[in-house]
Image (cartoon, rainbow, N blue to C red):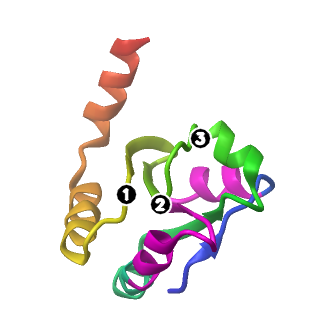
Amino acid sequence: MSTQTLTQQNFDEIVGGNDIVLVDFWAAWCGPCRAFAPTFDASAEKHPDVVHAKVDTEAEQGLAAAANIRSIPTIMAFREGILVFSQPGALPPAGLEDLVTQLKELDMDKVREQAAAQQ
C-alpha cells in the first residue's frame, strides 16, 4: 500500500478511523526527510495493514504546529487514535520495522489504563 497524504481536513478521519497509523512529518527541502522517504515507502509496501501517512510541514503548517513539531523528520504512531510514539529523526529500516512490530503487539487495554491514570 502506498503512503497517504495527511491534511488538516483528513487528519482526524484517517488517524481515528484506522487501527495503526504511522505519520511522517517532513518537508521537501529537508535532506534527512528525503533520505528517509524510501525506508518509509518500503515499510508501507511491506505492511499494508498499517496506514503510512505523510504530513508536508510546509503545506500543513497548522497541523505541524498542533502536533508540536520542532524538528523534521518526526515520526508519530497512533494506535486506535491514541498517540503512542513520537520521535524526531529518521529511523533506519530495522528501527522502523521494530516500531511496526511493537505497535502491532501493543496491549491497548494497558495503554488506555495508563492514559486514564494520567488524567
Q: Which residue is mark 1?
A: 89
The answer to whether the residue labelled 2 contacts the one labelled 1, judged by CB atoms less than 8 Å apart, is: yes
Q: Earlier in the sequence, mark 1 or mark 3?
A: 3
Q: Residue at x 19, y 65 (%)?
A: 98
Q: Residue at x 24, y 71 (%)?
A: 97
* Residue 91 vertical placement versus 4 (above, below): above
Q: Earlier in the sequence, mark 2 or mark 1?
A: 2
Q: Which residue is mark 2?
A: 73
Q: Residue at x 63, y 74 (%)?
A: 28
Image coords of residue 64 (percent x, y): 65, 47
- 101 sits left or right of 63 in the view: left
Image coords of residue 12 (percent x, y): 68, 49
> Which quarter of the image is occupied by the C terminus?
top left
Disc sitting over residue 103 in the figure: none
Task: Name the amino acid type tagged 3.
Answer: Ala
Q: Residue at x 25, y 32 (%)?
A: 110
* Residue 83 vertical placement versus 94 (above, below): above
Q: Residues within 10 Å of mark 2 (few under 14, many from 20)?
A: many
- 82 sits left or right of 26 in the view: left
**Which mark lies nearer to you, 3 or 2?**
2
Say what secondary structure mark 3 lies in: loop
**Which mark lies nearer to you, 1 or 3?**
1
Task: Name the amino acid type tagged 2.
Answer: Pro
Image coords of residue 91 (percent x, y): 30, 66
Image coords of residue 4 (percent x, y): 62, 74
* Residue 35 vertical placement versus 12 (above, below): below
Disc sitting over residue 67 in the figure: 3
Magenta residues span 10-38
Say what secondary structure mark 2 lies in: loop
Cα gap from disc 2 to disc 1, whole angstroms? 5 Å
Q: Is 18 one of the magenta-colored residues? A: yes
Front residue of 41 and 64:
64
